[in-house]
């Protein structure tokens, strides 16, 4: 049976991927491999991490609410 990773591990991996993606885009723009329009088009929104965090919290709340309803 496979185990699921803890939420903090998943969140840290998401944050790392977004950061690495952003750093790579900055390097590509700096070296002239992409222009500023391409950079903006490929960038995550500035509030991406907050949006993902909110979605995770909502998912947990919905899941826990459904679990409580199923127990009753």
Image: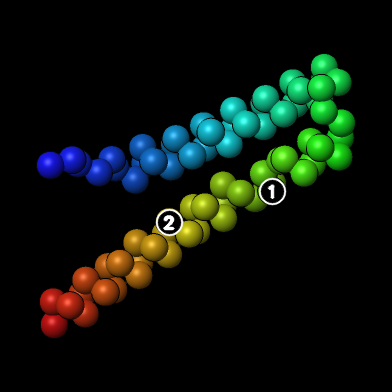
Counting residues from the N terminus, which is met first, the one under dot 1 or under dot 2? 1
Q: Secondary structure at mark 1?
A: loop
Residue at left offset 81%, top offset 37%: 38
Residue 45 vs 42, above or below: the answer is: below
Image quarter hosting the C terminus? bottom left
Residue 10 vs 69, above or below: the answer is: above
Q: Position of residue 61 (x, y in %)?
A: 35, 67
CA distance for labels 1 and 2: 17 Å
Residue at left offset 76%, top offset 23%: 28
- Relative to 23, is 5 on the left or the right? left
Q: Quadrant of residue 9?
A: top left
Q: Residues within 10 Å of mark 1 (few under 14, many from 20)?
A: few
**1 and 62: which one is in front?**
1
Q: What label does residue 16 carry, if any?
A: none
Residue at left offset 58%, top offset 36%: 18
Q: Residues within 10 Å of mark 2 (few under 14, many from 20)?
A: some
Q: Secondary structure at mark 2?
A: helix
- Are dots 1 and 2 in contact, CB under 8 Å? no
Q: Position of residue 69 (x, y in %)?
A: 21, 80
Image quarter hosting the N terminus? top left
**Pointer 1: what residue?**
45
**57 and 44: which one is in front?**
44
Q: Quadrant of residue 43?
A: top right
**Pointer 2: what residue?**
56
- Relative to 60, is 70 on the left or the right? left
- Relative to 37, is 9 on the left or the right? left
Residue 68 vs 11, above or below: the answer is: below
Colour logic: rainbow
Q: Quadrant of residue 8?
A: top left
């Amino acid at each position: 049976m496979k185990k699921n990773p803890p939420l903090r591990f998943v969140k840290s991996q998401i944050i790392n991927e977004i950061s690495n993606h952003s750093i790579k885009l900055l390097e590509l723009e700096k070296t002239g491999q992409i222009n500023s329009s391409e950079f903006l088009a490929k960038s995550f929104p500035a509030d991406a991490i907050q949006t993902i965090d909110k979605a995770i919290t909502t998912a947990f709340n919905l899941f826990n609410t459904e679990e409580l309803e199923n127990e009753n």
